Amino acid sequence: MRKIMSLVVVLTLAFSMAAYAQMGMGRGMGRAGVQQTSVANIEEAKALVLQQASNIKGAKVVSASEGQGRRGTMYIINVSDDNGKTYEYHVNPWGEVILFR
């Protein structure tokens, strides 16, 4: 009987945590201590990517384009280094820079 009750308590806690995680407590609520800025054009996206890629030697923007994401305009910036290796960065409408490949 004791094992069954403890199993019920554990499952109840697990399901309540899963429901809490699906309530939208993610990106839309903001992150603690992180300043979120919106990106209005490609030039701002380029500046964010070059700031992110500051540790890459000789980083320069090769191409930039914009595409439609789920909740706004995504910016796709290709950066090349001195060795000719290219990196693809995605910038979402909230200014988050993501190294794609």
Image: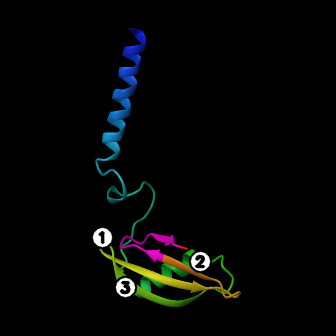
Q: Residue at left 69%, top 88%? A: 82
**Highlighted magenta segment, given as a residue range:** 90-100
Which callout, 1 or 2, points at the residue further toward the start of the chain? 2
- What distance separates the C-alpha of mark 1 from that of mark 2? 25 Å
Q: Residue at left 42%, top 64%? A: 35
Q: Quadrant of the C terminus?
A: bottom right
Residue identifier under label 3: 41
Q: Amino acid at mark 1?
A: Arg
Q: Amino acid at mark 3?
A: Asn
Tell me where residue 22 appears, x and y as whole percent. Answer: 31, 47
Q: Quadrant of the N terminus?
A: top left
Query: What secondary structure is found at the residue carrying circle 3?
Result: loop
Q: Is residue 95 magenta?
A: yes
Kindly indicate the quadrant of the structure image that contains residue 86. Answer: bottom right
Badge number at residue 53: 2
Front: mark 1 or 2: 1
Tell me where residue 93 appears, x and y as whole percent. Answer: 36, 73
Q: Residue at left 35%, top 40%? A: 18
Residue identifier under label 1: 70
Q: Amino acid at mark 2?
A: Ala
Residue nearest the observer in this picture, 20 or 46: 20
Tell me where residue 52 appears, x and y as whole percent. Answer: 56, 74
Kindly indicate the quadrant of the structure image that contains residue 31. Answer: bottom left
Which callout, 1 or 3, points at the residue further toward the start of the chain? 3
Identify the coloring.
Answer: rainbow
